[in-house]
Image (cartoon, coloured by chain):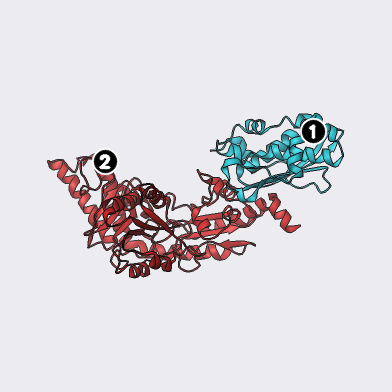
C-alpha cells in the first residue's frame, strides 16, 4: 500500500498549522471528494521563509502536504515552483496509483499560495515571468482544483 | 487483541481447524469417486450439509456449497433470474445490498431484465411500501439482506415475506452479516433462498453456501461435472466444507452467548464514542447487529482514522472513498442519505466473539486522541472553529 516514507510523514507530519499573517494562502481540493488542503507561506526576499499546512484527507493527502512543505521551505519562489506532484510523490518513495490524482494536491496548493502572494503584492509581471497567468485566472474565477475523473463532485 | 474488523476477516476457530486437518492429510478422496476414499469424502460433505441446514432450520430445503457468499449471491440473483425469465423479467434488490448482489443485478439489467433498487430510510431500513407498490405479476425475484454488513441495520424480512405472500416472486435473503449474530431461521423468515458465509462464523474462507428451498429452480452459473445437485460444478472443497459444517455446529450451540457478550461491548463502545463532539451513529440505534458499530466524525477522513488506529495496534474499517478500490464512498451510507463528505468520516468497527473488555478499554483510550489530532490538522475544523 503506502511506502515507509508516507507512513513516517503521516505519523509525524512536518509544518502542520496555520500562519495567521501569511503572505500567501493556497487552497485546493474539495471535501466532497475527500481531500482539501490549505498551504500558508511567509515570503522574504523572494524566498519561502516559513510554510504551514492544514489538510483534510487520507494518509496520502497528509503525507504529501507534509513533504511538499518540507521541500519548499527556504527555497526561492522559482525553485519552489519546480516542486510538482511527481516530485512530491517521488520524494515519498512513490504513491499508490489511485492516490496520484486525488490525494497528491499539495504541489498545487503550494503553487496557489505563491500566486496569491504575488497578486497580493501587485507583482503581476512576476506572475507572467513565472508562467502563472492561467493559475491566477482559475483562482480569480474561484475554481477549485479538480480531482478529474476520480470524483463526481 | 483489539481487532475490530471481524466482518472483513475472522480467525478460524481452533476446533474447526482440528476437524479440517484429516481431510487434507488422510481423507483426500474425491466425493465423486466410487471407492472407499470417495465414500468417506462424500459422507463428510453430506454431514457438513446437515449441520449447516440445522443452523438455519433448513428442513424444507438444501444447501448448495459455493466458494463463498459472493458466489452464493451471484447464483441466487443471476441463476434464479435466468432460470425463471419466462415468468417475468422484473427484479427488485435493495439499494444497500452487498456489491455481490448489486453488481449481478446490474448484469441482469444489461441482459434485458428490469431491475429496481429498493430505497432505504436514514437508518438503512428498506421501504416495504415500495416493494408492495412495485410488486407485479412479472416480478420474479426480490433480494433483501437479513442485516447490513456495514451499518448493522436489521431488515424487516418477516414483514417483507408477508407483503410477498400472494406474489409469485421468490425472496432471496443474504444472511452473511447476520449468521451467528442473531436468530437466522429460514422457516420463520419464509425465504426461498438464503446466502450463508463460513468465515463470518469462524469457519474457513473459500466456502459458503446458498440455502435453496424445495421447489426453487436455478440455472447453474458454473458449469462442469454437475457437482452440488448439478447447481455448482467443480470438485468439492471437502476440508473447507467440513470446516464450515463444524463452524455451523459450534455456532448453533454458542451463538447466543457470544452475541450477548458482543452486544454488551458494542453498547459500551457506542455510548462512549458518541461522547466525542460532533460524532454520529450510522445505522439503526436499536434494530442493529450485536457486533456492529458505525460512527462518523465531522471534519476528518476515515482512512486517516483507521491508519492512525492501526499505528496504535487497533484494526478497524471505514466507508470512506479514500480507502476503497473504486474511490467511491460506501453506497450504503449514500443510500441512507449521507453526503459524500459525511461518508468520508465514517469508522466501522465489527466485533467478534474473541473481543474482550480490555480491547474496548484500549479503543476508548486511543480513539478520542486520534480524532482530535486529525481535527487539529483539518482546515474544515479550523473554518468551523473560526
Residue A3 locus on image (x, y percent): 57, 35
- Residue B172 seen by the camera: no
Residue B102 locus on image (x, y percent): 41, 52
In the picture shown, does residue A125 fall above or below B238?
A: above
Which corner quadrant holds the C terminus of chain B? Answer: bottom right
Which circle marks residue B339 in the picture? none
In the picture shown, does residue B236 fall above or below B375?
A: above
Residue A117 locus on image (x, y percent): 82, 40
Cα–Cα span, label 2 and label 1:
64 Å
Label 2 Cα neighbours within 10 Å, binned few <14 / some 14-19 / many ≥20: few
Residue B170 quadrant: bottom left
Residue at 15 percent across and 40 percent down: it is B33
- Frontmost of labels 2 and 1 is 1
Extreme residue in the left direction: B35
Label 1 Cα neighbours within 10 Å, binned few <14 / some 14-19 / many ≥20: some
Q: Which chain is red?
A: B
In the picture shown, does residue B108 fall above or below A107?
A: below
- Residue B100 seen by the camera: yes
Which circle marks residue A74 in the picture? 1
Which circle marks residue B24 in the picture? 2
Judging depth in this view, the residue of B22 and B379 nearest the camera is B379
Q: Chain of mark 2?
A: B
Horizontal side of B266 relative to A80 (left or right) equals left
Residue A46 quadrant: top right
Q: Which chain is cyan?
A: A
Say what secondary structure mark 1 lies in. loop
Residue at 42 percent across and 69 percent down: it is B129
Amino acid at each position: 500500500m503506502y511506502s515507509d516514507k508516507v507512513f513516517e510523514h503521516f505519523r509525524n507530519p512536518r509544518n502542520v498549522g496555520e500562519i495567521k499573517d501569511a503572505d500567501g494562502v493556497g487552497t485546493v481540493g474539495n471535501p466532497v471528494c475527500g481531500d482539501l488542503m490549505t498551504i500558508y507561506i511567509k515570503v522574504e526576499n523572494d524566498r519561502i521563509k516559513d510554510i504551514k499546512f492544514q489538510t483534510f484527507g487520507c494518509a496520502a493527502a497528509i503525507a504529501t502536504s507534509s513533504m511538499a512543505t518540507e521541500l519548499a521551505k527556504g527555497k526561492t519562489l522559482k525553485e519552489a515552483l519546480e516542486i510538482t506532484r511527481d516530485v512530491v510523490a517521488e520524494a515519498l518513495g512513490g504513491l499508490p496509483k489511485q492516490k496520484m490524482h486525488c490525494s497528491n494536491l499539495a504541489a498545487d496548493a503550494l503553487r496557489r499560495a505563491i500566486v496569491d502572494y504575488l497578486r497580493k503584492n501587485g507583482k503581476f509581471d512576476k506572475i507572467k515571468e513565472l508562467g502563472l497567468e492561467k493559475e491566477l485566472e482559475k483562482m480569480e474565477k474561484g475554481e477549485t482544483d479538480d480531482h478529474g475523473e476520480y470524483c463526481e463532485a | 487483541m483489539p481487532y475490530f474488523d471481524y466482518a472483513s476477516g475472522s480467525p478460524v476457530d481452533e476446533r474447526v481447524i482440528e476437524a479440517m486437518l484429516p481431510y487434507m492429510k488422510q481423507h483426500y478422496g474425491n466425493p465423486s469417486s466410487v471407492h472407499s476414499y470417495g465414500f468417506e469424502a462424500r459422507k463428510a460433505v453430506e454431514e457438513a450439509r446437515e449441520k449447516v441446514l440445522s443452523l438455519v432450520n433448513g428442513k424444507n430445503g438444501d444447501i448448495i456449497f459455493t466458494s463463498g457468499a459472493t458466489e452464493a449471491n451471484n447464483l441466487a440473483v443471476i441463476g434464479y433470474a435466468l432460470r425463471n425469465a419466462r415468468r417475468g423479467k422484473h427484479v427488485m434488490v435493495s439499494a444497500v445490498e452487498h456489491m455481490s448482489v448489486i453488481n449481478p443485478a446490474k448484469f441482469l439489467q444489461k441482459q434485458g431484465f428490469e431491475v429496481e433498487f429498493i430505497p432505504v430510510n436514514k437508518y438503512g431500513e428498506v421501504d416495504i411500501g415500495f416493494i408492495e407498490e412495485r410488486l407485479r405479476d412479472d416480478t420474479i425475484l426480490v433480494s433483501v439482506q437479513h442485516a447490513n454488513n456495514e451499518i448493522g441495520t436489521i431488515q424487516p424480512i418477516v414483514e417483507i415475506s408477508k407483503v410477498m405472500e400472494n406474489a409469485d416472486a421468490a425472496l432471496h435473503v443474504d444472511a452473511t452479516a447476520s449468521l451467528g449474530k442473531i436468530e437466522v431461521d429460514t422457516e420463520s423468515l419464509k425465504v426461498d433462498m438464503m446466502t450463508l458465509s463460513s468465515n463470518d462464523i469462524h469457519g474457513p474462507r473459500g466456502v459458503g453456501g446458498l440455502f435453496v428451498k424445495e421447489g426453487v429452480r436455478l440455472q447453474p452459473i458454473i458449469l462442469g461435472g454437475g457437482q452440488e445437485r448439478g447447481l455448482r460444478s467443480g470438485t468439492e472443497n471437502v476440508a473447507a466444507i467440513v470446516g464450515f459444517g463444524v463452524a455451523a455446529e459450534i455456532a448453533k450451540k454458542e451463538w447466543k452467548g457470544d452475541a450477548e457478550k458482543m452486544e454488551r461491548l458494542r453498547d459500551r463502545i457506542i455510548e462512549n464514542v458518541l461522547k466525542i463532539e460532533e460524532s454520529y451513529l450510522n445505522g439503526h440505534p436499536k434494530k442493529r447487529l450485536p457486533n456492529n458499530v458505525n460512527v462518523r466524525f465531522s471534519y476528518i477522513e476515515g482512512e486517516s482514522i483507521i491508519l492512525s488506529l492501526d499505528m496504535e495496534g487497533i484494526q478497524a474499517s471505514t466507508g470512506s472513498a479514500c480507502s476503497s478500490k473504486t474511490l467511491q464512498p460506501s453506497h450504503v451510507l449514500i443510500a441512507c442519505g449521507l453526503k459524500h463528505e459525511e461518508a468520508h468520516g465514517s469508522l466501522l468497527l465489527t466485533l467478534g466473539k474473541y473481543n474482550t473488555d480490555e480491547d474496548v478499554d484500549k479503543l476508548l483510550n486511543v480513539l478520542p486522541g486520534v480524532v482530535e489530532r486529525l481535527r487539529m490538522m483539518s482546515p474544515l475544523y479550523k473554518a468551523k472553529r473560526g
